[in-house]
Amino acid sequence: MALWLDGECGKKKNKTLVYNDVSRLKEAQEIPNLKVAEKMSFWDENVEKFPKTLVCLNLKTLIVTGCYELTKFPSGFFQFVPLIRVLDLSDNNNLTKLPIGINKLGALRYLNLSSTKIRRLPIELSNLKNLMTLLLEDMESLELIIPQELISSLISLKLFSTINTNVLSRVEESLLDELESLNGISEICITICTTRSFNKLNGSHKLQRCISQFELDKCGDMISLELLPSFLKRMKHLRWLCISDCDELKDIKIEGEGERTQRDATLRNYIAARGNYFRALHEVYIDNCSKLLNLTWLVCAPYLEELTIEDCESIEQVICYGVEEKLDIFSRLKYLKLNNLPRLKSIYHHPLPFSSLEIIKVYDCKSLRSLPFDSNTSNNNLKKIKGETSWWNQLEWNDETIKHSFTPYFQIP
């Protein structure tokens, strides 16, 4: 039915083809279909190689995904597909090389190489002057090599992503320079691994305005992440944030302009800033930051929907200031996961309404003896609370009726 609708209810019969067996391309009866096809999709877990050429003169969209044994394409594979605009080669876990002829796809607008083992982008990609989207995500097992001046040559580029991909560190700064040079760039999703690169980002108003997803990964020389209000105001499109494997990072602070003392990093300053920052930020992941002490800055993320904190052995409190303050924080939070936080004692000192909360997962948080729940905490949207039975049984409650109201939602992993 989906293919029939995609073919305009049968009016464009055979213009969309789907194959789960690449060997069918060699069958004679498929040749007429290939000649008229405009969209084609392949997934074949067992295929190790494709035919030498693909003769589809009208093809505009080609999706090859989930071909786990495929390591490369024949050099002439793209020789007779001159009109391709969309090329998706993602999730081919053993693909290591792109075919030589890919630089001749002058009409190409979308290229997805995510979840492959391609180590180096060929400089010939610089010929793709109409390319608007380049996705290089989840290539974390490698240090991706992007030749200098390649990205700046893609003059039509609007969306660029290297989320969960480590770019070779010595070219990381030049990559930011090249992205900044592009006149049409409007959305950047990027992983940064050095303090020098973060400082480069911190000094570029243009890059800040373009970033929608940001990951700080393996930044071993960063001790404190200090964010100025002017920086945060320009990062207004940031919707996803991940900070992982930053072994020396102790705190994340929102500073006042011109004021850079610990004394200024108080909850009251954060409260005053709540409506001004992180208006698009919906997802935050904090992972394996062994010296990080708290995440009080999350008070400034009123629209947060998903929060995951894992493997941070020094955190004792998520929100650590303002024992006397009662704030309606996490009001839009739907998903909360706390995993392997051995010193965590408190999420927040006061009960919270949690009016949107659906799922809580707590694992290996042996010091967490209470949840910020009371009679005003909503369970209207709550679906489950997951954790070990031993942890649930040791929780302390101010009122047994509160415990009884939430016990039906508790599930073991």
Image: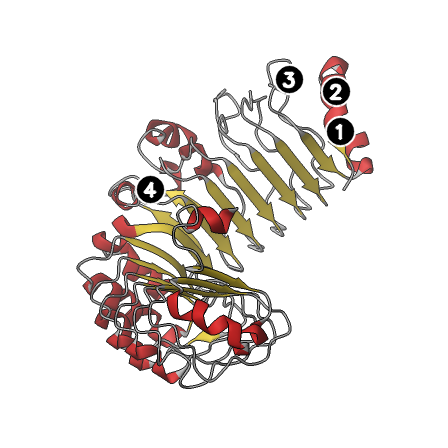
Q: CA distance from mark 3 to mark 1?
A: 13 Å
Residue at screen point 40% across, 53% down:
214
Mark seen at residue 255? 4
> Which residue type does callout 3 highlight?
Asp
Badge 1, how many Cα within 10 Å: few under 14, some, many 20+? few
Q: Where does the image place residue 43, in percent across and percent down from the top left? A: 56, 65
In the rendered image, which residue does mark 1 sit on? 395
In the rendered image, which residue does mark 3 sit on? 374
The mark tally for this picture is 4
Q: Where does the image place residue 396, in percent across and percent down from the top left? A: 74, 25
Residue at screen point 59% across, 14% down:
376
Mark seen at residue 403? 2
Which sits in the foreground, 236 or 157? 157
Query: Could you say whether the residue bearing mark 1 is in a helix, strand or loop?
Result: loop
Q: Where does the image place residue 136, in percent across and percent down from the top left? A: 42, 65
Q: CA distance from mark 4 to mark 3?
A: 33 Å
Which of the two marks, 1 or 4, is nearer to us in this view? 1
Q: Is residue 43 left or right of residue 127?
A: right
Q: CA distance from mark 1 to mark 4?
A: 36 Å
Which sits in the foreground, 146 or 1? 1
> Which residue type does callout 1 highlight?
Leu
Q: Specify which label sits upstream in the sequence, 4 or 3.
A: 4
Q: Specify which label sits upstream in the sequence, 3 or 1.
A: 3
> Which residue type does callout 4 highlight?
Glu
Which sits in the foreground, 141 or 391? 141
Q: Specify which label sits upstream in the sequence, 2 or 1.
A: 1
Do the residues under discs 2 and 1 have CB atoms within 8 angstroms? yes
Query: Could you say whether the residue bearing mark 3 is in a helix, strand or loop?
Result: loop
